[in-house]
Amino acid sequence: AEYMGESDQLETKMEHFISLSIVEKDAHGDVMVTWSYPTVDSEVGAVIVQHAKSYILSEAHTKSSFTKHKATWLYSQATEKGTNLSALPRVESFAIYLCAKDFFPEKYSALLKILTFAYATTGSPIDVLEGLLGVFNEGKIKIAEMTWVSSQFNHKKSLLTPINYMIQLLGPQIVVVWTALLIKKRVAVYCEKLGELLACIRSLPQLVIHRQDWNLLRPVVLLSELQLEDLKTAGVYVAGFIDPRIKGREDLYDLLIDVSSATVEVSATAKADLTVGSYHKELATWFNEASGRDPDHIVVKALRQRTGELLDKLRGLCKDHEGTGDGRSYVTQQQLADPELAFAPHFARFLYNVALSEGMAEESQTSSSTAS
């Protein structure tokens, strides 16, 4: 993808692999990790069980999922309804979780489907391990008529997911989402359906494509102490929820996107930083026209250019300030409030928050911005 700014690369090895775990649900409804290679970290193991119990081993949700806890990506595949589990007579359903250091849903999902088939067929973790070792050694696996070859998956292309859907779903509100991401606010995304939530949330980092940062995603989060502590530690995130109670938790977000109702809600503490003016309204009009006219990748490329122009404008305003001793140039709130610049107060605040997020400003004691 040309606008990604880097050449396409083919992933040929599992250098980002951390662990593989089998999670089983028995006839009594108990869910536990029954096997893993190598031994999974206890905290990640707890998140895996929480995720399996609440999502992919629940009949209400899709059987393929991904999420992130701290620095670890968790990819999962559960058995589909009607799967023959005669090789596992005490098991009602199961899922296999692959933990990795990179964001690559298509690659790991395809692999997990084959490993899930292998375990359902024989009921032996050894067959799963043999398949995994084949991937390590040869970069490919073939079981029955199912084939997986690591080199066939392109990491850059996996990042390019439909963004026009979100733009058209939210209408003019998309510019508030763009602003929140640009100034590094906490964004929560609510959706009743897990599959739709994952599709929507993974597209959002493209709104700030110049950062190339998918690690801020927490695609699906439970309102559990363990997972909420991870959000608190992260500070800045885009977190997904299917629990409607998130709507009443303004302490967890600055901006809430409700996919189910196609609405956006700004928390009371973030209203001043997310106020829109003429600049944002013009951008909202552009979003609407571009998403209705151009394919996704063209829209993202054009948005990157528009964002770049804004950042170039800020760089042009950076000045050397005496007394800092570090030789850096940056902008200040006082400078942006200069009458000669003729910036509306809310636009000056917006520019300052962008500058803070991009390392072009010094944190001011008088600023209420939470950008980091």
Image: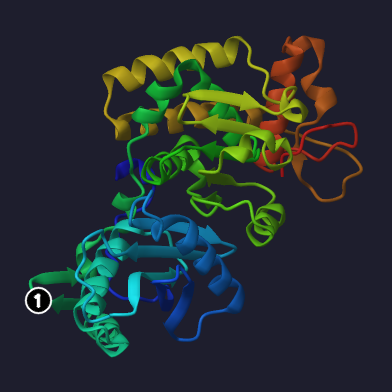
Outermost residue to the front = 28
Q: Amino acid at mark 1?
A: Ala
Can you say which quadrant of the picture contains the N terminus? Answer: top left
Residue 344 placement, left or right of 139: right
Residue beneath disc 1: 144
Which percent across, then down, holds residue 187? 60, 38
For residue 302, which quarter of the picture? top left
Please state which of residues 360 and 96 is positioned toward the viewer in this rendering: 96
Is residue 238 something one can see in this rendering? yes
- SS at circle 1: loop
Q: Is residue 89 above or below residue 261?
A: below
For residue 94, which quarter of the picture? bottom left
Is residue 312 something one can see in this rendering? no
Please state which of residues 93 and 206 is positioned toward the viewer in this rendering: 93
Please state which of residues 64 and 320 is positioned toward the viewer in this rendering: 64
Please state which of residues 249 and 280 is positioned toward the viewer in this rendering: 249
* Residue for point 57% across, 79% down: 41
| Colour option used | rainbow
Residue 324 placement, left or right of 235: right
Report the number of numbered marks. 1
Which percent across, then down, holds residue 340? 77, 10
Q: Is residue 325 above or below residue 3?
A: below
* Residue for point 49% across, 57% down: 54
